[in-house]
Image (cartoon, rainbow, N blue to C red):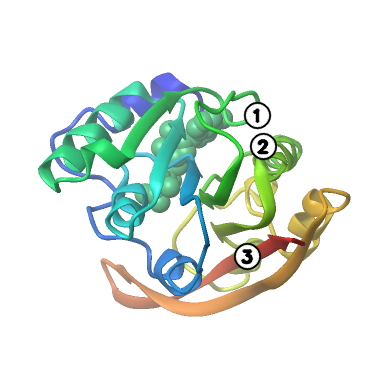
């Protein structure tokens, strides 16, 4: 799915992914303590629900997404929430982006469900901008969700699992601290249904 698809999807006043921060971003990024800089990149941050939350935690956040429509909504949201001075936008492809600010103490990648080879390139690129002592956090609809889970894409190539993310991080210098499926529930027309989410927290040694 290209940027036109996403621009079209986002061309409504409504926030498709809500303005509520992702609970795994809160769980895994919330406790991170840094001394000195608090610089962060969110890759594929869309309308910015996580970026704005991170800004409220004091992070200088750059949202990199190839949908300009999503980034316009994010910047308006950041202004609404009084954190515009901490939020920047970078309209670029995840596999090729040049950050406006680097290196960073925190890199976040949320629900970037793209083909495995592209996700590997994007993840490795993102990891390369993380400082010693810095973290990379990720969250995806898991490939394991295909076995009885609801929500998310159904094409296994855009659904990572523990093996594909381990391979993507191999040789980046990052050590995996958390990489596991989380079982949860999502709202469907038929009520609450099970759903499997893959979460990652990795750290570059100091
Ligand atoms: C499912 S949305 C998730 C948005 C956000 N992370 C969230 O959780 O609210 C996926 C996002 O990935 C972006 N995206 C998809 N492929 C991309 C690519 N190759 N480069 C940059 N952004 C991409 C889309 O524009 C979209 O905003």
Q: Relative to residue 168, is residue 195 depicted above or below?
A: below
Which residue occupies 14% across, 48% down?
Answer: 81
Task: Measuring from the top left, give residue 85's x and y in whole percent.
Answer: 25, 37
Task: Measuring from the top left, give residue 83's x and y in whole percent.
Answer: 21, 45
Q: What kind of element bears circle 2?
A: helix
Task: Return the residue nearer the eye: 135 or 185.
Answer: 135
Answer few, some or many: residues within 10 Å of disc 2's Cα (few below 14, many 20 plus, some between 14 and 19). many
Q: Earlier in the sequence, mark 2 or mark 1?
A: 1
Give how far apart the Cα atoms at labels 2 and 1 are: 4 Å
Residue farthest toward the right in the current orientation of the protein = 171
Determine if the C-beta at disc 1 is less than 8 A from ligand 1.
yes
Give how far apart the Cα atoms at labels 2 and 3 are: 15 Å
Disc 3: which residue = 200
Task: Measuring from the top left, give residue 103's x and y in whole percent.
Answer: 61, 39
Residue 189 is left or right of residue 139, and the answer is left
Q: Which mark is drawn over residue 19?
A: none
Give how far apart the Cα atoms at labels 3 and 1 are: 19 Å
Instruction: Verify CB contact (< 8 Å) between mark 2 and mark 1.
Output: yes
Task: Return the residue nearer the eye: 89 or 139.
Answer: 89
Is residue 47 in view from this perspective?
A: no
Which residue occupies 38% across, 70% down?
Answer: 23
Q: Which mark is drawn over residue 122?
A: 2
Disc 1: which residue = 95
Image quadrant occupied by the C terminus: bottom right
């Amino acid at each position: 799915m290209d940027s036109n698809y996403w621009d079209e999807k986002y061309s409504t006043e409504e926030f498709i992914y809500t303005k509520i921060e992702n609970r795994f971003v809160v769980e895994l990024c919330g406790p991170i303590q840094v001394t000195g800089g608090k610089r962060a990149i969110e890759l594929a941050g869309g309308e910015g629900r996580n970026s704005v939350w991170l800004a409220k935690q004091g992070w200088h956040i750059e949202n990199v997404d190839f949908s300009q429509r999503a980034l316009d909504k994010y910047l308006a949201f950041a202004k609404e929430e009084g954190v515009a001075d901490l939020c920047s936008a970078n309209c670029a492809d995840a596999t090729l982006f040049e950050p406006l600010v680097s290196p960073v103490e925190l890199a976040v990648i949320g629900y970037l469900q793209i083909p495995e080879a592209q996700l590997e390139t994007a993840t490795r690129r993102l990891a390369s901008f993380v400082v010693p002592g810095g973290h990379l956090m990720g969250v995806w609809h898991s490939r394991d969700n295909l076995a009885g889970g609801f929500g998310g894409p159904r094409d296994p190539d855009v659904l990572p699992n523990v093996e594909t993310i381990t391979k993507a991080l191999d040789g980046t210098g990052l050590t995996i601290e958390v990489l596991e499926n989380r079982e949860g529930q999502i709202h469907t027309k038929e009520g609450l249904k099970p759903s499997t989410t893959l979460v990652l927290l990795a750290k570059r040694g100091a």
